[in-house]
Image: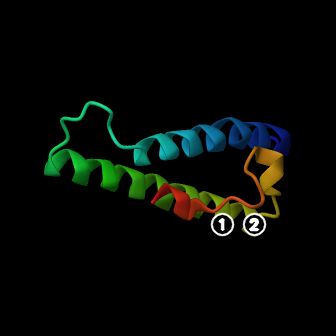
Amino acid sequence: MTRENETNYLRDVLPDLLAKGREARTPSLSGGENEIDTAFARGRAEAYYEVLSTMVRQLAAFGIERSAVGIPDNLDLTELM
């Protein structure tokens, strides 16, 4: 895999994961949430946070600019919590 392919892969995957993480933190509109549903939703949001924070940290470790893969430089991943 070339560096360009890797960057393109990350450009596709990371914004998608970020969107899904933001979606996971949004409360259900069904109005029928119970404690189990709420706990599941919180755990799901936390999982996205863990994955994305690791991936974003690794971008820096590999010298890849966030903007090169569609992640804003000023992104605060704690917004997913």
Quadrant for the C terminus, please. bottom left
Cα gap from disc 1 to disc 2, whole angstroms: 6 Å
**Residue of label 1:** 57
Amino acid on which disc 1 is placed: Arg
53 in relation to 26, above or below: below
- Say which quarter of the image contains residue 30: top left
Whether residue 57 is visible here, answered yes or no, is yes
What secondary structure is found at the residue carrying circle 2?
helix
Whether residue 1 is visible here, answered yes or no, is no
Residue in the picture at 56% in, 40% down: 19
**Residue of label 2:** 60
The local crowd at label 1, few if under 14, some if 14 to 19, many if 20 or more residues have their Cα within 10 Å, is few
Residue in the picture at 51% in, 45% down: 22
Q: Is 20 left, or right, of 34 in this rendering?
A: right
User: Percent x, y for residue 11?
Assistant: 73, 40
- Say which quarter of the image contains residue 14: top right
